[in-house]
Amino acid sequence: MSERKPPAISLRKQPKQARSNELVAIILEAAIQVLAKEGAQRFTTARVAERAGVSVGSVYQYFPNKAAILFRLQSDEWLETTTLLRSILEDTTQPPLSRLRRLVHAFIQSECAEAQMRVALHDAAPLYRHAPEAQQTKASGAQTIQRFMDEVLPHTPAAARVLAGELITTTLSTVGKHYSETSRTEAEIEVYADAMADMFCAYLRGLDVAMSSDRPGAGSAGSEPG
């Protein structure tokens, strides 16, 4: 039995004029509102068009199907997350583990602030998760995490650094989604993010110490402020 072909999720055409860009922005804003109100299961192109006040044909000029609209929303969210990753993890004025702690706090705060939309996008993920465009978009964030692991764990074998990056990324994503499904106070978010940061920092210190303990005078992640 042949595998099901992934849906087309790229834009039919790129908006080039100001008017076209404005139309796409209106469609995406309407899509956000429909997704927040109806959820992924009841999300349709017709509902988006109605909410945007345009014809379905106008939507189809740019988006071939509802999966393409949802993927664009998800791509924008991934871009926002990747930008956050880079702005914090590539700030070499701060020690690595201080950066990691900042990232955990910023990520959990963001998850809780946008919980409704992110849960809806997660529910829509089966529509596009296997499409090449989705894999390419997610790869950018993974590369940022991996460069950070190369910096913070210089004495650790490459395979262990990859595993550490995947473990932290998966834990942040999974636990962040679960934690944000319930309304939280700022104080609760702060305590929870601190606990996650403590766990990640302890894990990386342990890896670094294990690999550098036989290197006289070698620095370790554990020597930095957490």
Image: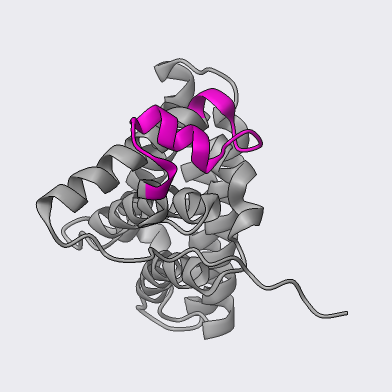
Q: Quadrant of the N terminus?
A: bottom right
Q: Is residue 219 magenta?
A: no
| Residue located 42% across and 37% down the image | 49
- The structure residue drawn at horizontal position 48% and vertical position 61%, both measured from the top left corner, is 205
Judge whether 171 appears above or below 37 on screen.
Answer: below
Q: Residue at x 19, y 44 (%)?
A: 22
> 190 and 68: which one is in front?
68
In percent of width and height, residue 100 lies at 38, 52
- Tell me if residue 179 can be seen: yes
In-front residue for pair 87/73: 73
User: Is residue 203 positioned above or below 130 on the image?
Assistant: above
Give the answer, above or below, for where 143 lies relative to 16.
Answer: below
Residue at (47%, 44%) from the top-left corner? Answer: 197
Horizontal side of 172 relative to 51 (left or right) equals right
Q: Position of residue 14 (x, y in %)?
A: 27, 65
Q: Is residue 173 left or right of residue 143?
A: right
Q: Is residue 174 visible?
A: no
The answer to if 44 sits in the magenta stretch is yes
Residue 223: x and y in percent read: 36, 59
Residue range in magenta is 36-57
Q: Say above or below: 51 vs 103.
A: above
